[in-house]
């Protein structure tokens, strides 16, 4: 099994979507990057992927 990549600004949207992240991790990433933190996990994933 491949090790999950660290969630950071260097990941492109498609690569990011290939890995599983906890909602809490997504919220922390959003806060660090001044993105909206509301919504469900799928909304957060789409928001980050588009970022």
Image (spheres, rainbow, N blue to C red):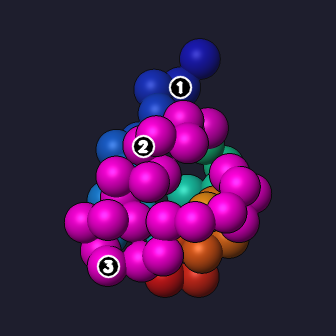
Q: Is 24 a magenta residue?
A: yes
- Compared to 26, does 13 lie above or below? below
Q: Earlier in the sequence, mark 1 or mark 3?
A: 1
- The residue carrying mark 1 is 2
Residue at 68% x, 51% y: name it.
Answer: 41
Residue at 47% x, 33% y: name it.
Answer: 4
The quadrant in which residue 3 appears is: top left
Is 28 left or right of 48, judged from the image as shown?
A: left
- Compared to 50, does 42 lie above or below? above
Q: Disc 1 to disc 3, how far (Cα)? A: 30 Å
The x, y position of residue 24, in whole percent, is: 46, 40
Magenta residues span 20-43
Dot 2 and dot 3 residues touching (CB under 8 Å): no
- The residue carrying mark 3 is 34
Quick check: can you spot residue 23?
yes
Q: Secondary structure at mark 1?
A: loop
Assess disc 3: are there few (<14), some (14-19) or many (≥20) residues with their C-alpha within 10 Å of its C-alpha: few
């Amino acid at each position: 099994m491949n090790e999950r990549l660290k969630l950071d600004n260097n990941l492109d949207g498609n690569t990011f979507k290939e890995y599983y992240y906890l909602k809490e991790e997504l919220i922390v990433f959003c806060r660090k990057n001044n993105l909206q933190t509301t919504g469900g996990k799928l909304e957060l994933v789409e928001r980050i992927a588009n970022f």
